[in-house]
Amino acid sequence: MTKLTIAAVAASPFLFAGAAFAGPYVNVESNLSYPDGEYSAATTDVHIGYEGTVGTEGKIAYYVQGGPSLNHAKSTDDTETELSGKVGASVPVTDDLAAYAEISGATNGEDASGDNIVDWGGKLGVKFVF
């Protein structure tokens, strides 16, 4: 079985400081689901990424990351491995306000005809520092 390779866009509202660091990193993140207070699922992403800045005076921050996504469902008590990734950017609007955007994608098995399923997500936001 072949997997679809995913590139995704993610901007970090946390990385908008003036100091610029460009380079590789590892990001491990778990998201758990508790509808009505009852555990139902967990997704753990183990990503390798790269971040940096571009533009005039390096004001546009970006990152790209991807890797395996471990998905556990309580209903089947099984963990499946898929691929996921994020790509994004943040840009200053004023000295106290930054805007950011993120696009993410993750494989999600195959459909009935054997084609890979990809779930996409996106985010837009602003961060105000006071």
Image (spheres, rainbow, N blue to C red):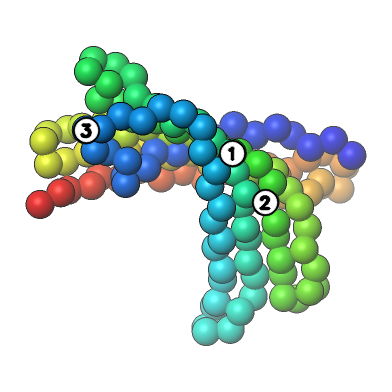
Q: Judge from the rendering whether residue 1 lies leftward or rightward of residue 27; answer left or right.
A: right
Which residue shows up at 56% across the image and 68% down it?
Answer: 32
The correct choice, above or below, for 44 with respect to 127 in the image is below
Q: Depth-wise, is mark 2 or mark 1 nearer the camera? A: 1
Earlier in the chain: of badge 2 and badge 1, it is 1
Q: Which residue is mark 1?
A: 48
Can residue 122 be seen here? The reply is: yes
Which image quadrant is residue 48 in?
A: top right
Distance CA(mark 3)–CA(mark 2): 32 Å
Q: Residue at 29% of width from left, 16% of height from top?
A: 55
**Viewer-nearest of labels 3 and 2?**
3
Q: Position of residue 121 (x, y in %)?
A: 52, 45
Tell me the number on the disc at residue 18: 3
User: Reading the chain from its start, which is encountered first: label 3 or label 2?
Assistant: 3
Q: Give the image location of residue 53, x and y in percent.
A: 35, 24
- In the rendered view of the protein, which quadrant contains the N terminus? top right
The residue located at (71%, 66%) in the rendering is 72
In the image, residue 70 above or below residue 104: below
Q: Hey, which quadrant is residue 120 in on the image?
A: top right
Q: Which badge, 3 or 1, is on the more N-terminal residue?
A: 3
